[in-house]
Every structure is written in structure tokens, then in C-alpha cells.
Image: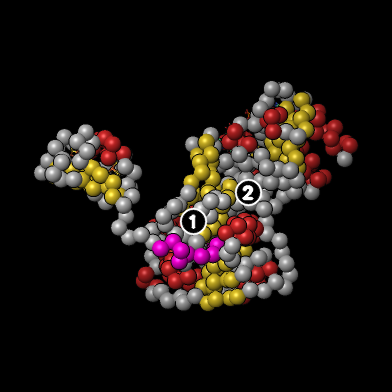
Amino acid sequence: MSVRVIVEKCKGCSICVKSCPFSAIDMENKIAVIGDACTGCGVCVDECPFDAIEKTEDNVKKDLSEYKGVWVFAEQREGKLMPVVIELLGEAKKLAAEIGTDVSAVVCGDEVDALTHELFAYGADKVYQAVHPELKNYRTDAYTKVIEEAINQYKPEIILLGATHIGRDLGPCLAVRCDTGLTADCTKLEIDPDDKKIRQTRPAFGGNLMATIICPNHRPQMSTIRPGVMDKAEYVAGREGVAIRLDVNFKEDEIRTKIIKIVKEAGELASLTDAEFIVSGGLGLGNPEGFELLKKLADKLGGTIGSSRACVDSGWIDHSYQVGQTGTTVKPKIYFACGISGAIQHLAGMQSSDYIIAINKNENAPIFEVADYGIVGDLYEVIPAILEQL
Ligand SMILES: Cc1cc2nc3c(=O)[nH]c(=O)nc-3n(C[C@H](O)[C@H](O)[C@H](O)COP(=O)(O)OP(=O)(O)OC[C@H]3O[C@@H](n4cnc5c(N)ncnc54)[C@H](O)[C@@H]3O)c2cc1C
Ligand code: SF4
Ligand code: SF4
């Protein structure tokens, strides 16, 4: 939607100027003028007491029926697929089956043949390959240009990207270039049975509200998906599909982002998304040394430790261990919540674990509302007792 000022009706009262949340309206010669910052939110339309601002439909309407297929951005780093790609393929398969279409992956890199076979095995029917030495590592301009051209040429109906650092950078660039809608950091996708549009659900307002968003008039419908939320696609060895080479022709001066150096974070980083057992600790540990006890239990089970944000904020443990809305979303077989109260932002990251076992001194702690098994007691007594039994 856009808006326009009906010049003949404008009385120059400037009420709309103050009403615009994006400071997009200026007064020129006592007439309101809407500038480039306008997002088309429509607030000013209702605010004008003289009905001098009206909504206009976008002039260029896309022919939505031209857009077919579900695409997954196959993010690779150092020639390896990111685990979220397998989750996206799992979800894409489900969506494609409901709409009656196929699943494609788009992969960029300097050498993509092995990745292409892996993508077929995980369920991609087609793989669009962009191959160039300059695509070896992610660069915003280069990836955007190549994928934008592929979207314009092949017209996918839906595009899914992982809400990784790269996906969160690339997704909005593509959406703006393709003049379409993007829902960021989705935790649930479903197809509307009536009109076959995708309903994209994501937590909003600090996880206190779940917003379901649709993209009715533009294509492709684009979502970034939170890693660790969707079920992984099944691996079928030897499954084949169709590989399609994309034209890659950009001039180096068109690419403004240059990689000077890639620096990997030093020290141990948690790998929470793949763990089957997570023993997580909160402020109830009392001190950072408490994680050593949790580590004993995690090692015994072949899992890893995790943490609430309160411990990360207290400097007890690295952020890569944080579970929750602003940390990692996990889905292990068993999640132990030890000395964690169960704030909504923590629950947002672990609620879909197969089994939740809570250990907490306070029987009224909210964590017990989501726990399958709850033990009311001091974790420093309970965990050694569990270890003894294992
Ligand atoms: C925008 C936003 C985003 C956030 N994102 C996240 C997030 O991603 N992840 C996250 O975890 N939090 C997040 N938070 C913070 C969240 O709201 C809580 O503050 C945090 O999860 C609390 O951590 P906790 O459970 O460790 O601490 P507390 O709430 O202090 O709970 C400690 C618990 O330990 C129990 N306890 C104390 N001693 C013992 C003992 N010896 N044995 C057993 N139990 C004991 C207590 O009864 C209590 O229930 C976010 C907050 C905001 C505003
Ligand atoms: S509120 Fe309406 S009448 Fe007043 S300046 Fe804005 S457009 Fe003109
Ligand atoms: S539609 Fe929204 S953004 Fe655009 S001028 Fe009106 S209030 Fe501002």
C-alpha cells in the first residue's frame, strides 16, 4: 500500500507531520508532502481531519500465478552445509507437499558438487548452483546479486533461509531487491488450506506475543527460520535431482563488501543444536563452578551443558551456551533445567524438547509448568544422587 496527499483538500494544518512515526511528511508551501521514508503504514490517513490523505494501491501488481516452488537457501561455510539447511529442507518438503509443488535449493560457493549431492539426498528436487571463486565466502552484495537474478528468472513461490547471521543479512537484502515481504526468525510455518498462502509465525515483543504474518500480494513469500526449531529432512543415500547452473557475472567493483580476514572466536564454543542431552544451569547454581557438576552429568549422558541468560549476563559462561529467545533454540531428547526459574524467554528456547526434567528448590517455580518430571530440591544434592544411580 502507498499513500498520497489530495492537494486540493489539504488545509496545511500539519497534524499529519507529527503523526507520522517515520518522519516522512514535510510541509512545503503549506501543503503536506510525503517523502521517501514513507513505509505506507497508513497512520496519517486516519489522522488527517480533512480526509486529505488517501491510500493508493500499488500500481504494479505481480502475477502471482507465475511463481512456483519452494526454495531453500543452502548456506555453506567452508564447504559444509549449515545444520539449519537440513531443517529447512525438512520443512520445505512438508510445505511443498501441501501446495503440490517441488523443493529446490540454491547454493553459492567456489565448489558445490559435493554439496549438491548432499542436498539431493536430503530431499531437494532441483539445485540451483552459483559457482565462482568470489562466492567461496559469504559477501552481502555478491550473494544478493546472484540470488536476486535467479529469483527473477525462475520465480519461486516461497524462499526459506536460516535465521543465522548470514541468513539475517541476506534475507532482507533479497526481499527489498525483489520488492516482497519477509518474516524474520519464524518458529512455525503452515499453509492456509483455503488460499494456499504461507502463514508465518514468529515471537514478537520479547516472546510475549506470537505474531502470524502473511504476504498476500507479493512473491516470493520469504521467511528466515530460527535454527533448531524445524524437524530435519531424512537422508536418502543416492537420491538424485536436477542441477541447474546459474549465470554468475558480476564485476568486482559492483561488490562493495570485501573480506579482509575471517577471525574465528577463540575458545570452546557450545554446539547445542545437535545435542541429544542438555544439562542446563541457571542462577540457582550460585556460582560459575556449579557448571562443573552439570558437566559431570552431561558427560555421563554423552551430552552438553547449557545455560540461562542470567548466568551469561553474570559472566559465568560464554553466550554460545545460552538457551532461549536471545540464545539458541534447542530440541534435545532430554533437557535438564537445574536452578532455572523458567522465565518465558528461557522457555521459548527449550519448550519443544522431548522430555524436560526440572530441578529447583522452589516448588512454585514456573519451570515446573512445562516439566515432564520435576524434582523439588537443592541441585547440589539431587544431581550427585542422580549421578550415583547412572
Ligand atoms: C528481551 C529478553 C530476552 C531474554 N532472553 C533470554 C534467553 O534467551 N534465555 C534466558 O535464559 N533468559 C532470557 N532472558 C532473561 C529471563 O527473563 C530471565 O531473567 C532468566 O532466564 C532467569 O534466569 P535463571 O532462571 O537462571 O535465574 P532466576 O530467575 O534467578 O532463577 C533461579 C532459580 O534457581 C532456583 N534455585 C536457587 N538455588 C537453587 C538450588 N541450590 N537448587 C535448585 N534450585 C535453586 C530458584 O528457586 C530459582 O527458581 C531474557 C530477558 C529479556 C527481557
Ligand atoms: S493533516 Fe491533512 S490537512 Fe493537515 S497538513 Fe496533513 S494532509 Fe494537510
Ligand atoms: S503512511 Fe505512515 S509512513 Fe507514510 S507518511 Fe503516512 S504515517 Fe508516515
Image coordinates for residue 191, horizontal then vertical, percent = 56, 52
Quadrant assignment, res 178: bottom left
Q: Mark yes or no: residue 157 visible.
A: yes
Q: Earlier in the sequence, mark 1 or mark 2?
A: 1
Alpha-carbon distance for marks 1 and 2?
A: 17 Å
Report the residue that reaches farthest toward the right: 389
Q: To which residue does mark 1 refer?
A: 222
Q: Is residue 330 positioned above or below 176 on the image?
A: above
Kindly identify which numbered label has been placed on residue 307.
none
- Is 310 one of the magenta-colored residues? no
Q: Mark yes or no: residue 226 visible.
A: no
Q: Nearer the viewer, residue 288 or 209?
A: 209
Residues in magenta, as a range? 63-74
Q: Residues within 10 Å of mark 2 (few under 14, many from 20)?
A: many
Image coordinates for residue 58, horizontal then vertical, percent = 32, 55
Disc 1 residue type (three-letter): Met
- Is 69 one of the magenta-colored residues? yes
User: What residue do we see at 32% from left, 47% from top?
Assistant: 40
Left or right of 281 on screen, residue 26: left
Q: Is residue 70 positioned above or below 268 on the image?
A: below
Kindly identify which numbered label has been placed on residue 229.
2
User: What residue do we see at 60% from left, 51% from top?
Assistant: 227
